[in-house]
Structure formats: C-alpha cells, structure tokens
Amino acid sequence: METKARVLIDCHDAKGLVYKISKIFYERDLNIDSNREFVDKEKERFFMRTVVSGTFEIDELDVALREVAPIDAHIRVIAPKDKKVVLLATKESHALGDILIRNAAGELGASIECVIANHETLRELVERFNIPFFHVPAEGLVREEHEARIMEKIDEHDFDFIVLAKYMRILTPSFVAAYPKQIINIHHSFLPAFIGANPYKQAYERGVKIIGATAHFVTNDLDEGPIIAQDVIPVNHRFDWKEMQRAGRDVEKVVLSRALNLVLHDRVFVNGNKTIIF
Amino acid sequence: METKARVLIDCHDAKGLVYKISKIFYERDLNIDSNREFVDKEKERFFMRTVVSGTFEIDELDVALREVAPIDAHIRVIAPKDKKVVLLATKESHALGDILIRNAAGELGASIECVIANHETLRELVERFNIPFFHVPAEGLVREEHEARIMEKIDEHDFDFIVLAKYMRILTPSFVAAYPKQIINIHHSFLPAFIGANPYKQAYERGVKIIGATAHFVTNDLDEGPIIAQDVIPVNHRFDWKEMQRAGRDVEKVVLSRALNLVLHDRVFVNGNKTIIF
Amino acid sequence: METKARVLIDCHDAKGLVYKISKIFYERDLNIDSNREFVDKEKERFFMRTVVSGTFEIDELDVALREVAPIDAHIRVIAPKDKKVVLLATKESHALGDILIRNAAGELGASIECVIANHETLRELVERFNIPFFHVPAEGLVREEHEARIMEKIDEHDFDFIVLAKYMRILTPSFVAAYPKQIINIHHSFLPAFIGANPYKQAYERGVKIIGATAHFVTNDLDEGPIIAQDVIPVNHRFDWKEMQRAGRDVEKVVLSRALNLVLHDRVFVNGNKTIIF
Amino acid sequence: METKARVLIDCHDAKGLVYKISKIFYERDLNIDSNREFVDKEKERFFMRTVVSGTFEIDELDVALREVAPIDAHIRVIAPKDKKVVLLATKESHALGDILIRNAAGELGASIECVIANHETLRELVERFNIPFFHVPAEGLVREEHEARIMEKIDEHDFDFIVLAKYMRILTPSFVAAYPKQIINIHHSFLPAFIGANPYKQAYERGVKIIGATAHFVTNDLDEGPIIAQDVIPVNHRFDWKEMQRAGRDVEKVVLSRALNLVLHDRVFVNGNKTIIF
C-alpha cells in the first residue's frame, strides 16, 4: 500500500547530510515527489522539506532519519492531512469571511474548530457556516482575566494553529508563550512600517504611496515575530485613511490566506526571527 | 436640505466646457467635493465626473447642464445610492463568495437581487446568506433556449448590472445585445493573453512567469470588451496548471471586486473599447 | 503664435475656484490640454495643475489668476522647458548611471549641470558623458566644513533641483534649509521601514519578504520628507543582505527616475509632509 | 587548493538520482554550497543545480557524474567565471545603456565582446565605454544578406550568448538555428499578449490597465521562445501609446538585466518551451 509523507528536517549543517538522508530514501525505494533544501550559512543551519511516497512505515522512517541526523536535529515525518485551527476575531469580517468561504469550498486544507471573538458582531456570519462561535467579552475584565477565558475556550479544542483573523487585542507574553510557533497573525501594514495601533492612519499621515499587509507568527515582541508572507498595493493622495483601510482589506485577507496555505502544508520553517518558505 | 449628486458627462470636446459647467455649479452655490476630467485627444471626447453638494434639485441641475453641453452629450446627474445587481455563476465559489461576504458586511455598495447558476453547486452557499438562488440547468437545451430561460429569470428582477462571477458559459450576441454596458465579467487571465477556454492551462503550456485576471464589460467579441481592472501575480516552474488556477483565484476575486466597486460608484466611463476610470 | 503653459495653483479651498479659474482660461480662448485638481478636505487646500495652450502672455495670465485666487495662493504659470539639476553621488553608479543614460538619450527632461561626489570613483563614468565632475573629499573635515565646500560648488551652478543619486552622507539642517523643496533623495528602503543606515541589512535581519525604495524630498527629519514615489520587489530567505542590495538597486534607480520625471514636469505638489502627484 | 563548481544536470527522472549524485559529492568530501532540484512530473525530467566546493578536479567529477546519470543526461560541471556576450541593438539606448552601466561597475557578470547594430545611432554611447561597435546597415539588402553580414561579425567573436538589447528586426529561422539556446531577447510586451510589431500601440488600442516586458530565448516561432523573466507596471487611460512606451522602457531594461543575471549564472534550464529557474 502506497504511503506518502512530508519529511521536515531542521538541524545544524554538516557535510554529507543530503547523501545520508537520500540514502535512507533510496534504501526504502521511495519516490521523491518534491525536495527543497536551504542552508543558512550565517547560522550554519540546514533545512529540508521532502515529500516521499512508497511502501514504508512513517515511524520507521522517522527513526532511521534520526540516526543519521545531527544530535540537535528537529525531524518530523508527517502524513499529509488537514490541520486543525482555532480562529480569533473581533468585528471585521473580511479575513474571517475569506477563510470561511475557502473552507466551505474544501480549499482551506484545514478544519475550523471554532471561532472565538471578543464581540458578538461576527456570530451571524460564522453560524451561517455551521461553525461554533464563542463570544468572550472583554468588558469589565483586566487583560489577564479576559485572556484566561479565551485560553480556556481555546484549550477545549484540539488544534494545530491559532489564527488571529483581525483579532484586535494585544496578547500578553504569557498567552503567547503558551502557544509557541502556533499563533499566526495578520497585521494591517507592511511591517516593520507602522507597528502598533491604526497603521492605516499612520500610513495616511506619513503620505506613503504603497500600503501592505503582513502575516507573521506571534512572539512576545509586538508585531516583531517571524514574517510568513507580505504583499502591497499602491495608493495615492486621493486615499484618506478610511479608503486605505478599505483597499487594504483585500491585501490583508489574501496575505493571511497565502500564509495559512503555506503553514497548513508544512511549508514554513521558523529560523530564529525569520522564516524559510518552501 | 443638503443634496449630493454625481455629475457624469461624456461628450465631444469643446472649448469652454469646464467653464460653462463650473459656472452652473457656481451659480447654484454648490460645493465641488471631487472633480475628475479627461480629454481623449484622439477621439476629441471629454469626460467628467464631479461630486457636488448643496441645496439644489437634481432634475433642474440636469436640465441646466444639458443646455450648455454639446448636442451629443451623455449627461447623468445621479444621487449616490446602492445599485442593484444580478449575479450569474456556475460552480466556483471564490468570486461569488467574496461578493457575498462584502455584501453581508455592508461593504459592497449594492444590493444583490439574486444569484442564477447553471448548476446546483452554489445553492447552499448563497442561501446561507438569504439571497435568492435560481438553478437554470443547461442540460438538454440548445444555447439559445438556455439563455432565454436565464434572461427570463434576470428580467424578473430590477437591476443595474449583471455580474458574471465565474459564469463559465459563452454568451450569445443576442444576450449581450440585450444588456449593453451592463454585463461585467471576470476573465481568468491577463487579457488579451489567453483568450478563450482554460487560460490557466494555456498559461502553464506557455510557461509564463506571471498570471493575472481581467474584469471587463462583455461585448459580442469574446473576451474583447472594455477592460475595467486587471492584476497579476508571479508564478514559477513549480506551478502546474491546477496550482496556477488555485493561486489565480485570489487575483480573480480581488480584481472583480475592485471593478465592481468602481462601476457601482459610477467611476467608469466606456470610451469605445476602452474605459476611463475616475 | 501658440503658447503653452503649465498653470500650478496651490491655495486655501474656496467655493467657485474652478469657475473663476476656468473663466480666465475661457476669456482668453485657451485650450485646456489637461487638467487635474485635488482638494485636501482635512487641510481645506486646493491643488490644480492645468496645461493650457493658445495665444496669450504668461505674465498677463499669471496676474489675472492672482486676482481671483485666495490671498494665500501659490500660483505658478510656467512655460514647459527643461529644468536644471545638480547631482550628488558617492560611489555607486546605478542611480547616477541611469540618469546619465536617460540624459544622453534626451529622455531626462533636464540638463545636468554637474555631478559632485565625495569620492573619485564615479569620475570616469561621468566624464564619459562630458558632464563636469567635482570631487569634494570629506576626509579630515568636520561635516560643516565639507558641506560648506559642497554648497560652494553647488552654488556656482544654476539649478532647479539637487538630486541625491545615492549620496551616502547625512545632510545637516542648515544644508537642507538652504534648498527647501529642492533636494530629492532616493532612500534604499520602503520608508518608513528601515530608516537610517544600511536598510538592506536591517531588512535581512528582520526577515521581510518584500524590499523597496523611496524617492522623497529631503527635510530636516532624516528620511522623513514628503514621499514622491515608492516601489517594491519580492525577496525570500535565499537572499542575504548583499543580494537584497543587488536586487534593490534596480528598484532604487527606477523609483528615482520616476520621481525625477514627475518633479521635472511640475507634477508634484508638496502638501505639508505629503505630496500630491498629478 | 579549494575549487568551486556549478553542477548542472538535466535528465530523465529516475529513483535514486539524488542519492547517487550526493554520494559522489560525499565521497569527494565536497561542500554543497547550494542545491536546487525540480522534477517535471509531466515530462518525467529531473533538473538539478548544485554549487559544490572542495578539493577536486572538475573533469573527474564530470566523469563520475556521467557514470551514475541516465544515458540521456545533459551534465555540465562548470567553474564559475564570466560569460562572454555579443549585443545586438538598433536605436534605443535604455536596455543597452543599462547593460553598459552594469558592466562598467563590474556588476554584469559577463564581458561584452562587442555591440552590433543596424543603425549608427548608438555608436557614441557604446564607444564612450570603450566597447567595439559595429554598424551593419540593412539598407538595400535582403534580409538574408543582412543577417549573413551580422553573423559574420558575430562569428569573429568568442561568445556564450547573443543578447538582443532592443534589436528591432525579425530573425530568420536559419539565423536562430545557428545559435540554439544562445539568443536572448527582450520583448516589449507581457507575452503572449501583443506578439509582433508595436506592442505598446496594440496595448493602447486594447485599453489594458497593465503593460509589461518579457525576456525569452529566441526560437523560430516569433516571440514564442522559452520565457526567462517577465514584469509589469500599471497604466491608465491617461497614457497614450508613446507614454506607455516611455514607461515600459524601465520594465524592459530591468527584465532583460534580471534575465541576463540568471542566464549568466547558469540558473536557467530550458525545458521544452519553458524554463526552470533556480
């Protein structure tokens, strides 16, 4: 019976790595459906994403790879299957709606476990798609209390990634630390330009001729996590900040979906504060 | 009571037009909220889109403008209000879904009268949003019969524009002639490259490094109508045509929505086989 | 005898401006070859660039316009002719070379009075094109002394604009103040991202997926002047900072030339810290 | 003594190829500085570009690789060094000038053997850079005679590639056949849109909102050869075809230089009528 797996390797670079790894594939008579490698010369790190197919046991392959890889190697041998995501949102529907439409068409490559929001606004939209919607209001709560309730709701679900589909609240370090490399955010600017609140207003004030959006992993440094995808659109003096916001929404949703598509297909390696995209 | 209107003028160019028109605004003490003009030197045609506000009667302003404009002038003085659209679709949900999400958020600037499709596939999605969905199957019918049924359904509705949100059937000249400058299509290529069927496959075969999408008015010449908006994304040798199609969908939906936004706000003039976009 | 002029008006917005101005054109039987207007609602400022042709005196038209415009109006009636520019450079040839090639082809729309550089590196290139080259070394001089020598050299020439074609030294406030709205710089990042030194290295460290360049007027705030033009290109994890720099050069030179083309044709209005581009 | 080489392999796909090739590298204790692979599933072809360094003989490595590769393999083991190019041009200086400036700065990665043109126009520019310029006029000659003279001049030089830097004459099949995969052209449209003469005029007539340029290998089918690089810029109704041409020049030169950079670094494989770019 034909098996298919994604082999993901991230380790200290060493001579002969490709040889030793491809030897393991060869000995098992595996097809290499695709293969991408990269060496970060500065950090002396090796990254590899190979899709193999053939008659093999995923666990056995995993063990064999660990035997030849450097001691620090982070190795994953994964059967391709849909990841699970929990979505956080606030009031805006464009990024969330785009994900819901893709999901309904079977094009997302993930199952949406639920949507959690700090406002009721999006309930109707989410429930149209028969996705569980949880309203966790922040009113009257200190940030830690609110987050504790959000985390409680998140942790009731099985998930691979938490996607902030325009969730407009800043997360505390302890929230972020609880889900390392699992939180993906869409920031409504071309980072690192316009970090922080209301980037469209900042862009308008600065008089830029191009605006953009950035999808990134969330780390403790606000808007400073590893960037997965970015895109831009031209604007001009006729755009006030509301019009920039309106135009920017199309970039936001497309960039978030592009980033999600990469992450959900295991195409993204985190390398310090950067990403390797295969 | 403050009135607002869009003044749209399209006429043979003549000396003094701006003076005569602005005089009419001045005499009525109108504010010019925005003003765009263009002269096509080759065709000697003048185009103007002005948004005015003040205390005035739309009909009276219209009459006054007609008195100073050349005999051939096409003048419209329009109160800004939502247009009505009828959507045609087939099976793909990305372009239609994008419009439904914008509409649900109150961002479309139009009311969707209904969706008519030649397959049942999209009924569930459309009805989630409480929009009427009509299935007009083409099986067993000659093209003219099918179109007659579609037109019958269209004509039951009040509408300004017919939007082909990935409606995958070619329209006959008589259908097109029935709705001049009213049918807007999204073509899944960067026209005039890859006219006709399966442009992504054509793009793949040709080995292009960029693919795109084109929103245009539909005329009798297949994929040859006046272009409203276009955009592109890079591809590379790793994309097979299905992957180009998947990537292209994001461009299609964004370009269609951008074109719709322009058309619905009366920002598009048709000038022969071209458009003027204000 | 047919005269042509660019009419540039920048003033407080007021009702009837377009009427009063177009009346002046109409009374002199002028053709309006092109006309662009913009009102900054926030600042209540009116901007207009009109190209007129006919039988008229530039000075008389200028006087007539001043009579109808608000007291604060900044009005220019200019015969289209080549501007004069002084170029400042350091060692890199791409931006300077691009300007020299355009100039040699008669496509720049300006005459290059001279190139002043703080290194000898570019002398050979500049002199190939028979343009005067002046080396003003900075070694052993405090910034003010060096700038005084540069200014002395600049002021020996007649010029409309000073173009920093990758001049890699920071200018003092007094230098900048001496040439208000006359100094145009190309910054090698997508401002306001990566202000300051070595933006490509900053971009590499940050792991961005897009890099860019920004042409702007120079003001006293480092890299904060009004932006004229920006553009970007995609990069990925395979780019080290030297490769970003190499790739970025193409954007730099194209953006600078685009900005120059706009400025040299009087298409740029400075509006506070922003620009209006017609 | 450390040697560096580019290993370029293009062959029928087969199981174990990566293993066998990396084994050869491993046995010689070579560093893999970079490695890119691609399998065209449809055509079952394997492509690989690896940069290796270490203590080895290029010829010996070449022989070893041939022993493990399929019989049809096209293998090249190349020491990185500057390629030689012959440039053909007509009258326009932007693409040629860009190459000359890069070359003068030592950034081209090639030596320019000469420029051959069918007009005298560019002599002055070329000779400013001390590059041999040959004028081969076409007046009074049938196409074959003119080409024979051009080929005679080309063949007097040692070269790897012939670069058509806006050479505005159509080449005959016999000319093209004489230099397979060696002729690189810049076409002033976003191919396959606007094949043939005056694409900017065609673009203007069609009313497109984006124009572009395409660098490609020249084959016998006009404008149909494998595409190396493409890029685009937005235009609007204010552009007449001359303005499209002016704006397009920046895209043309940048796309041609980008393509040259890829070709000169052995990053381009021709795969039927497409390219693989590593």
Image (spheres, coloured by chain):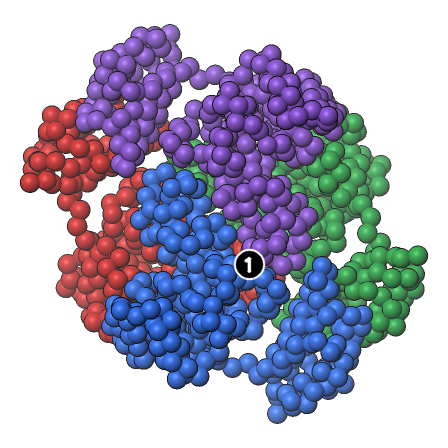
Chain colours: A purple, B green, C blue, D red
Q: Position of residue B158 (x, y in %)?
A: 84, 41
Which quadrant would the C terminus of chain D be assigned to in this image?
Answer: top left
Residue at horizontal 79 percent and vertical 75 percent from the top? C19
In percent of width and height, residue A257 lies at: 55, 32
Residue lying furthest bottom in this view? C1
At label 1, counting other C-alpha atoms closer than 10 Å, the crowd grade (few under 14, some 14-19, many 20 or more) is some
Amino acid type, callout 1? Val
Return the residue nearer the eye: A4 or B163.
Answer: A4
Q: Classify residue D29 by image quadrant.
A: top left
- For image coordinates 29% across by 44% down, the residue present is D268
The reply to whether residue D16 is in sight is: no
Instruction: Give whichever of C119, C145 is nearer the camera.
Output: C145
Is residue A111 something that shows in the picture?
Answer: yes
Q: Indicate whether D278 appears above or below A182.
A: below
- B212 with respect to C72 (left or right): left
**What is the quadrant of residue B130 in the picture?**
top right
Q: Depth check: C115 or B75 in front?
A: C115
Q: Quadrant of residue B112?
A: top right
Q: Position of residue A197 (x, y in %)?
A: 61, 41
Q: Which residue is mark 1?
A: D235
Instruction: Give me the residue at 74% from left, 51% from top.
Output: B265
x 70%, y 32%: residue:
A91
> Chain under label 1?
D
How many numbered badges does the structure rendering display?
Answer: 1
| Image quarter (top left, top right, bottom left or bottom right) of the N terminus of chain D | top left
Q: Circle 1 sits in a helix, a strand or a loop, which is it?
A: loop
Q: Is residue B264 left or right of residue D210?
A: right
Q: Vertical placement of C83 versus D211: above or below?
A: below
Describe residue C182's horizontal placement relative to residue B261 as left or right. Answer: left
Q: Residue A77 placed where, x, y %? A: 36, 16
